Image (cartoon, rainbow, N blue to C red):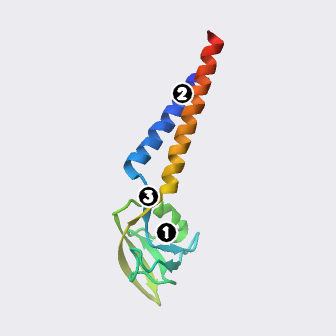
Amino acid sequence: MALGMSVVTALFFVVSANAIVTMGDRWPLVGWSSTPGQRPLVTSVDSTGPAAGLLQTGDAIVAFNGDSRIVQLGVAVYRRFMAVDSTYTMRVNRAGTESDVRLTVGETRDSDSLLLVVSLWLAALVTVRGRHSYCCVQAG
């Protein structure tokens, strides 16, 4: 059991350390939001975000990087894997006319998320050390 917990904890440390090193407090920002689920519509566009002037409220999202399954799957599946500074193309239907819109993923700084990862990492470390010390005292 202790070995299993050590492996799980080590894996947690590797994943969280990778997140800290690769992203730090940088998180993807698309600058628009949409209705959840099937047949997504753009519900808002941040006037200072990367989609400003390119998307409009009410645009129907027809395809994402050429994939029309977005109509069935929704936007969340596609947005999950977007990286800062990457580009993507959305086909939108605006007032009956379809057009492709090329967009770039911006970035936002989120120190709260970074602090959460670090605090969870430290809490796991303290927990593991506490269990390890307890096991050693019992065995000795």
Q: Position of residue 122 (x, y in %)?
A: 53, 38
The quadrant in which residue 107 appears is bottom left
Q: What label sits on residue 34 in the rendered view?
A: none
Q: Amino acid at mark 2?
A: Ser
**What residue lies at 54% left-to-right and 27% top-to-bottom?**
6
- x, y percent for residue 83: 39, 59
Q: CA distance from mark 2 to mark 1?
A: 40 Å
First reached walking from the N terminus: tag 1 or tag 3: 1
> 28 or 116: which is nearer to us?
116
Label 1: element kind: helix
**Quarter of the image that includes the N terminus:** top right
Above or below for 52 versus 30: below
- Tell which tag, 3 or 2, sits nearer the viewer: 2
Secondary structure at numbered mark 2 = helix
Label 3 amino acid?
Phe
- For this orientation, the residue located farthest to the bottom is 95
Please name which of the two marks, 2 or 1, marks the residue nearer to the observer.
2
User: Which residue, given by chain and number where applicable, does mark 3 sit on?
Assistant: 81
Q: Is residue 57 above or below residue 88?
A: below
Separation of marks 1 and 3 at Cα, in angstroms: 14 Å
Sequence-wise, the earlier of marks 3 and 2 is 2
Residue at mark 2: 6
Give the amino acid at mark 1.
Ile
Q: Residue at x 51, y 73 (%)?
A: 33
Q: Vertically, is 6 above or below 110?
A: above
Seen from the viewer's position, the closer of residues 61 and 21 is 21
Q: Position of residue 20 (x, y in %)?
A: 42, 47
Marks 3 and 2 close (CB-CB < 8 Å) = no
Q: Which residue is mark 1?
A: 70
Q: Quadrant of the C terminus?
A: top right
The residue nearer to you, when weighing 52 against 35, is 52
